[in-house]
Amino acid sequence: MAPVPRTDVLLAVFGGPHRTDLVSTTFRLAHALLDRGATLQVWTCGDATGLTRRSLGDSKPRNVVDWTRDHPSTAAVARGLIADHPGRLHWYVCRFCSDERGMGDQIPEVRRRPPFTFHEHTQAAGKALTLGVC
Amino acid sequence: MTTPQNPALVLVDRAYRGSVETQFADVLYIIRELNRQTGGLHLALRGHAVTYAVAAPEYEPSVHLGSRTLDTLPDPRRSVRTMLDEGATVWVEEADLQRIGPKAASRLLPGTRTAAPGELALRWFSYSQVWFM
């Protein structure tokens, strides 16, 4: 198992999507940190593990009143952010939470980790911020 | 559009339930379609959802994420305007409107109506259905 890389910040996303603007805040915060040159880990737990599940594909289902417009999935957005910052953004997904919710099949750009390694990730980050609760 | 004699009432009071993950598919997306299928419904905005009917300076609901500009975020004010154009009746709870600022009432989108506390509940019997969404 590869060691957890040392990063400036860990964003632990415990809150779920489609409830508040927490997921948007997560992406914006990640972008802002990376834009300033920081290194970053994102760790998702609970329903947030679904943000990067493979079955989302690249796009959301079509909008029936705007049929030709592409609406990227959160998996595509996360994949793009990771690709834009090679070696500086590491995205981890809680294995237990994703298995429990049937979302274990994840995009290859993220790594699933056993839940009890979370402490190791907090120790590898200069600062840890949690967003929401499971 | 001919408004049905006993339209449905749809109440929304929980606003802003996601942007990057939601995009076009916010709560108003399905309500707009219900408006079309029912021939005209009444939408009541309460809580923070009253801001959907308050005009704001022009802005583009988009966000930069890495090299991507995501410009398909929800735009509830635009959706409310569209629903008004398509014949929906939009109510805004006065008390919740006052809570967001003394000038908010003067910035309501044209065509919206305000409801006093309890006013809509007293009218429930006149609606064919009442939905909380």
Image: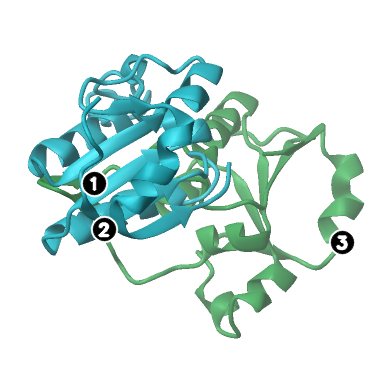
Residue B60 numbered mark, or none:
2
Are callouts 3 and 2 both on one chain?
Answer: yes
Name the secondary structure under disc 1: loop
Name the secondary structure under disc 3: loop
- The chain containing the residue under callout 2 comes to B
Which of the 4 image quarters holds residue B120?
bottom right
Q: Colour in which chain B is shown?
A: green
In the rendered image, the vertical position of residue B1 relative to residue A42, given as above or below: above
Q: Amino acid at mark 3?
A: Gly
Which of these two is toward me, A4 or B48? A4
Q: Answer yes or no: do the residues labelled 2 and 1 have beta carbons within 8 Å? A: yes
Residue B118 numbered mark, or none:
3
Residue A45 numbered mark, or none:
none
Q: Earlier in the sequence, mark 3 or mark 1?
A: 1
Q: Is residue A73 visible?
A: no
Q: Residue at x 63, y 36 (%)?
A: B40
Q: Residue at x 13, y 59 (%)?
A: A35
- B55 with respect to A101 (left or right): left
Q: Earlier in the sequence, mark 2 or mark 1?
A: 2
What's the CA distance linking mark 3 and mark 1? 38 Å
- The chain containing the residue under callout 1 comes to B
Residue at mark 1: B71
**Chain with cyan colouring:** A
Q: Residue at x 91, y 41 (%)?
A: B125
**Within-10-Å neighbours for mark 3: few <14, some 14–19, many 20+:** few
